[in-house]
Amino acid sequence: MESCPLWAKVTPPALPPHFVRRQRLLDLLHQARSQLLAVVAPAGYGKTCLARDFLDTVSHHRAWLTLDESDCDPAVLARSLLGAVLGPGAQAGDVSPHELVDQLLAQLPQGLTLVLDSFERLAGADRALGLLRRLLAHLPASCQVLVAGRSLDSLEAAALRTGQLSGIGASDLRCTAGEVLSLAAATGESLDPAGAQAL
């Protein structure tokens, strides 16, 4: 399996030059009362940009992890999570993935917000998803996880059963006419309200 260096996976991506903040979506995320927040939609809907911008608006501890196919291995995923939260140089030790997650839970900073991007990379990886369910089941009340991806796989069903999930979908991510006008202005394009509404 190909894997990016850990430092690259735990570094939040830069926002594009003409990025326009979508305050209505940030408000939806901030108003949610769930520990698991989800941004789920097909490619091209701005999931990563929204997750990155949301992290910028969080005043307490922040962590980012871009998942890749190597994280389907629970041992790799556990170390990726540890590196995202405690830093790429965090020592994992010779322990099982479940023990490593338990160690991480014991060291989580109060008020942590953790973003897991490209979540669809874990599709069908039952053992890795089980590790994340373990993390979520024991997440301190002051912490939350935002998952961004094209699907949530079995994590979604488990979270919905416990009332743990609040989400934003493709219909929410579609730009309003006002957002289209703001984006056009940011890129130097001329567009009237009727044209924005048609888009």
Image (tube, rainbow, N blue to C red):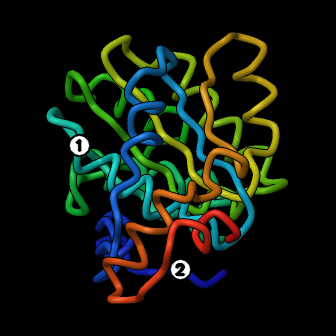
Residue 155: x and y in percent read 73, 35
Camera-side residue of 119 and 53 = 53
Taking the image as shown, residue 110 lies to the left or right of residue 113, namely left
Q: Residue furthest left?
A: 59
Tell me the mark number nearer the camera, choosing from 1 and 2.
1
Q: Which residue is mark 1?
A: 57
Looking at the picture, does residue 104 appear above or below residue 25? Answer: above
Q: Quadrant of the C terminus?
A: bottom right
Look at mark 2 in the image and give the residue it sits on: 3
Residue 8 lies left or right of residue 72; in this view the side is: left
Tell me if residue 172 comes above or below residue 184 in the rendering: above
Could you say which quadrant of the image residue 157 lies in? top right
Image: 6 above or below 26: below
Along the polypeptide, which appears first: circle 1 or circle 2? 2
Q: CA distance from mark 1 to mark 2?
A: 29 Å
| Label 2 packing within 10 angstroms: few (<14), some (14-19), many (20+) | few
Between 72 and 100, the one nearer to me in the picture: 72
Left or right of 99 on screen, residue 14: left
- Identify residue type, mark 1: Thr
Question: Residue at left 28%, top 83%?
Answer: 17
1 and 2 marks in contact (CB < 8 Å): no
Q: Residue at x 66, y 81 (%)?
A: 1
Camera-nearest residue between 76 and 54? 54
Residue 43 percent across, percent down from the top left = 69, 71
Instruction: Give the percent coordinates (x, y) of residue 80.
Output: 43, 57
Going 64% across and 29% down the picture, which residue do you hit? 133
User: In the image, is 48 to the left or to the right of 63?
Assistant: right
Q: Secondary structure at mark 2?
A: loop
Residue 181, quarter of the rendered image: bottom left
User: In the image, residue 127 lies at what x, y percent?
Assistant: 74, 44
